[in-house]
Image (spheres, rainbow, N blue to C red):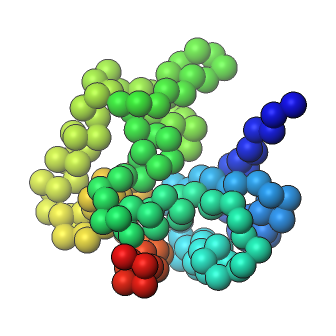
């Protein structure tokens, strides 16, 4: 029979690095499911990123790192919503009760009535408020991904992680581009 790749979706909680290493050692691709991580979780994600970037035995993608790295390398506007398969214009999730939701990590949020404009509306809301999104260098790719569920979430730690990914993408572009 034909083999189908397996992707392990891992929620970012304390200890996720060990789970990532186990999944990768079994040859699985990994998708990190993250909402609004605290400093400790971001530090653990930075360790996972370092493992992904520098461990020669890693031969499967770790998302969202992989696609965001490619986006930074290509200087492309691909969003975390798209990378994480949570773009309401494209992706649909249905609960066991039949309710259509925005994403599994935000399962309390019903699919917006105007799914085709949801991200545009979120973008406008976050940029017009004069909050941290309005001056964030990562907003093109993030588009408020880390601002749900709590719009007041401070992204300082997440920006450190995104900066590490962007720097790696820039280094690759200088080396190979």
The answer to whether any part of residue 147 appears in the image is no
Q: Where does the N terminus fall, quadrant-wise?
A: top right
Total count of labels: 0
Tell me, yes or no, if residue 35 can be seen here: yes
Image point (57%, 38%), residue name: 104
| Residue nearest the observer in this picture, 73 or 94 | 73
Task: Tell me: residue 107, above or below residue 5.
Answer: above
Q: Is residue 53 left or right of residue 55?
A: left
Q: Residue at x 19, y 70 (%)?
A: 135
Residue in the picture at 85% in, 59% down? 26
- The residue under the point 71% across, 80% down is 55
Q: Position of residue 132 (x, y in %)?
A: 24, 68
Is residue 110 depicted above or below 10 in this figure? above
Residue 113 occupies which quadrant of the picture?
A: top left
Residue 83 horizontal/vertical position (percent): 47, 49
Please provide percent x and percent y for residue 112: 35, 27
Q: Specify the quadrant that holds the C terminus.
A: bottom left
Q: Nearer the viewer, residue 66 or 149?
A: 66
59 left or right of 139?
A: right
Counting from the top left corner in percent of width and height, residue 149 is at: 43, 48
The quarter holding residue 163 reads: bottom left
């Amino acid at each position: 029979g034909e083999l189908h790749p397996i992707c392990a979706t891992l929620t970012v909680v304390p200890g996720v690095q060990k789970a990532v290493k186990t999944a990768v050692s079994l040859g699985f691709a990994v998708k990190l499911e993250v909402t609004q991580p605290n400093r400790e979780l971001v530090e653990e994600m930075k360790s996972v990123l370092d493992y992904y970037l520098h461990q020669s035995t890693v031969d499967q993608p770790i998302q969202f790192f992989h696609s965001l790295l490619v986006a930074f390398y290509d200087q492309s506007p691909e969003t975390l919503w798209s990378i994480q398969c949570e773009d309401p214009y494209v992706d649909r999730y249905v609960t066991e009760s039949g309710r259509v939701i925005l994403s599994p990590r935000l399962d309390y949020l019903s699919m917006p009535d105007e799914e085709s404009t949801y991200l545009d509306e979120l973008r406008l809301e976050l940029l017009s408020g004069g909050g941290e999104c309005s001056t964030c260098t990562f907003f093109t790719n993030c588009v408020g991904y880390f601002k749900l569920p709590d719009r007041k979430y401070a992204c300082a730690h997440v920006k450190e992680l995104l900066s590490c990914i962007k720097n790696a993408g820039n280094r690759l572009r200088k080396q190979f581009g």
